[in-house]
Amino acid sequence: MIYFVRHGQTFDNLNNIIQGNGDLTPLGVEQAKETAVKLKDVKFDICFCSPLKRTKQTLKEILKFHKNLEVVYDNRLIERDYDEVVGKHFSEIINFEGRWKGTETLPYKIESLDDFYNRVASFYNDVKKQYGEKTVLVVSHNGVAKMSNAYFNGMPKDKDFSTFSLKNGSFHIFQYKKNK
């Protein structure tokens, strides 16, 4: 079982800016604390976390209830690479609303949806081999949550990943399908 936590709100989230490695807002810290309380009684076997600052800040609150939990930072859990548009306001980016649709035609150098999905899928394939029957905590980003949902529940129709989203500081439970 995978408990997937999205990091708390950042200043870039608040201002509709494509994120780099920013800090949580005071609300983001509170969201992380609330999620930590909701997860305090879950017995995790291991935690995997994106190495970006906002996920580490979120994890810090969770670890207050899970002091001895082994944490592995994995680059495959980093948010989609937006390369040349990091730091720009959403309104400055042509066709940005289409970034999660399989028909995207963004005129920028950013990580493709296929490459992003394959990166996240390789992470879950490795986790399944080693921890398939365990309870795993993953702390990451909304884009990774979208790819996680596709991995566990099937590719969305027309590769439109925009239909699944996690709010800042929330969590979702994914489960590996039993082999027949």
Image: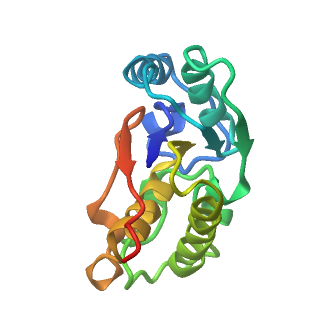
Q: Residue at x 55, y 70 (%)?
A: 121
Which is more toward the observer, 42 or 20? Answer: 42
* 107 to the left or right of 153: right
- The residue positioned 56% from the left and 53% from the top of the image is 88
Q: Give the image location of residue 72, x and y in percent.
A: 73, 43
Residue 104: x and y in percent read 42, 80
Q: Residue at x 44, y 28 (%)?
A: 42
| In the image, residue 159 above or below residue 40 | below
Q: Nearer the viewer, residue 139 or 105?
A: 139
Q: Is residue 22 left or right of residue 146?
A: right
x 63%, y 39%: residue: 46
Horizontal side of 1 relative to 163 (left or right) equals right
Q: Nearer the viewer, residue 32 or 63?
A: 63
Q: Where residue 21 sits in the image (x, y, percent)?
A: 68, 41
Find residue 160 and report its image quarter. bottom left
Image vertical order of residue 166 relative to residue 61, above or below: below
Front one among 2 and 76: 2
Q: Is residue 131 above or below residue 104?
A: above
Q: Is residue 15 visible?
A: no
Q: Position of residue 176 (x, y in %)?
A: 42, 62
